[in-house]
Amino acid sequence: MQTTFEFRTDGPGLTDITAGIAAWIPPGAEGLLTLFIRHTSCSLLIQENADPDVQRDLLAWLGRFIPPSDDPAMSYLRHTAEGPDDMPAHLKAAVLPVSLQIPVQSGRMRLGTWQSVYLFEHRTRPRSREVAAHLA
Amino acid sequence: MQTTFEFRTDGPGLTDITAGIAAWIPPGAEGLLTLFIRHTSCSLLIQENADPDVQRDLLAWLGRFIPPSDDPAMSYLRHTAEGPDDMPAHLKAAVLPVSLQIPVQSGRMRLGTWQSVYLFEHRTRPRSREVAAHLA
Amino acid sequence: MQTTFEFRTDGPGLTDITAGIAAWIPPGAEGLLTLFIRHTSCSLLIQENADPDVQRDLLAWLGRFIPPSDDPAMSYLRHTAEGPDDMPAHLKAAVLPVSLQIPVQSGRMRLGTWQSVYLFEHRTRPRSREVAAHLA
């Protein structure tokens, strides 16, 4: 069972896509869900869903870990023609997940209490993003 | 075929869970094993299993890469109410695997010679951790 | 359906293995492809496939993020007997993927336009690397 989800993003940050994914899983389904993002400048991520400061801190940390390419610390980067957010987005996409696998039981993803599924946008401008889903 | 493993952890570090997982796989099984950790402050990891210094170095490196939130370098973090190890644990859980997929042949995981499967605890206090397993 | 691919690498960098993997997938196949690398000092990675500067920048960035163990910044590392590229290779293998999962439809991986599948070597000397593949 496969489908493709499309999501709009509006700048760097996390979009909770848990409910949309959950609604696609048939009642009583047993198996393994795979989500795969068809892009190289955004990611999928399972993260804490309770305190908004966690997402804020994650973004703040990631921006310090991998600054924009117009930051003096990143002056060695060459792939800069598409903007200062472009090459850093590829680097973030290298260290964060391109796919997620979640066991499904009785029609529900076996997420922990504090886990939600996020699309993590790394680019500055609004985008349309495709997530391929597979359940078997 | 699904189950849930429970492991006790006792502070930051790697627990080798290879043998427990291997014992659950039926003799002669063919397929794909998925492990999924149901938490946002610990990880799963496949790492080198021969020299204990590798694990020691990995922990030392990770603690420098993502220091506790009471380190002056991390003073911009806001999610600090649950202790200086909490937000860094979420950050470590973002860059290290939440799930692992390992092909299984003739009832054995197709791990390389130097690979073992670890639960990687990031929190300071003892915890009980759940790993959902799926084999098909 | 399982197999093992063997690839030669010749020092740090990305080898595009997309075509070899694609040729193994039967025409019309539907399902999920899993690739798993049987080593702890190299990785699998999906990355941008258009501008060679992206790979160059990724390598440059990774070498700054995790320098060789004879770099003064890494003097706390102890697992150094096998050369200055060894422990850093294990660290890179911890933060980059050991496995990839890609939905397959009509016999083709559902990669995005700019995505290719790479074997990412972290060691200096030429190596032979095994990638276990599973399709179901």
Image (cartoon, coloured by chain):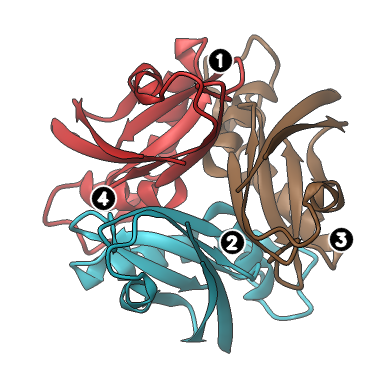
Chain colours: A brown, B cyan, C red
Identified at 50% across, 19% down, the residue is C54
Image depth: mark 1 or mark 3 in front: 3
Task: Kindly report the distance in space between the C-alpha atoms of the residues bearing marks 1 and 4.
Answer: 28 Å
> Foreground: A11 or A16?
A16
Rendered-image quadrant of the N terminus of chain A: top right
Same chain for labels 2 and 4? Say yes or no: no
Same chain for labels 3 and 4? Say yes or no: no
> How far across and how far down the image is residue A7, in percent?
83, 32
Residue C77 figure quarter: bottom left
Subunit that carries the residue with mark 1: A
* Amino acid at the residue labelled 1: His
Image depth: mark 1 or mark 4 in front: 1
Residue count near mark 1 (Cα–Cα under 10 Å), binned few <14, some 14–19, many ≥20: many
* Amino acid at the residue labelled 3: Pro
B28 shown above or below A17? below
Query: Which dot marks residue A52?
Result: 3
> How far across and how far down the image is residue B20, in percent?
36, 79
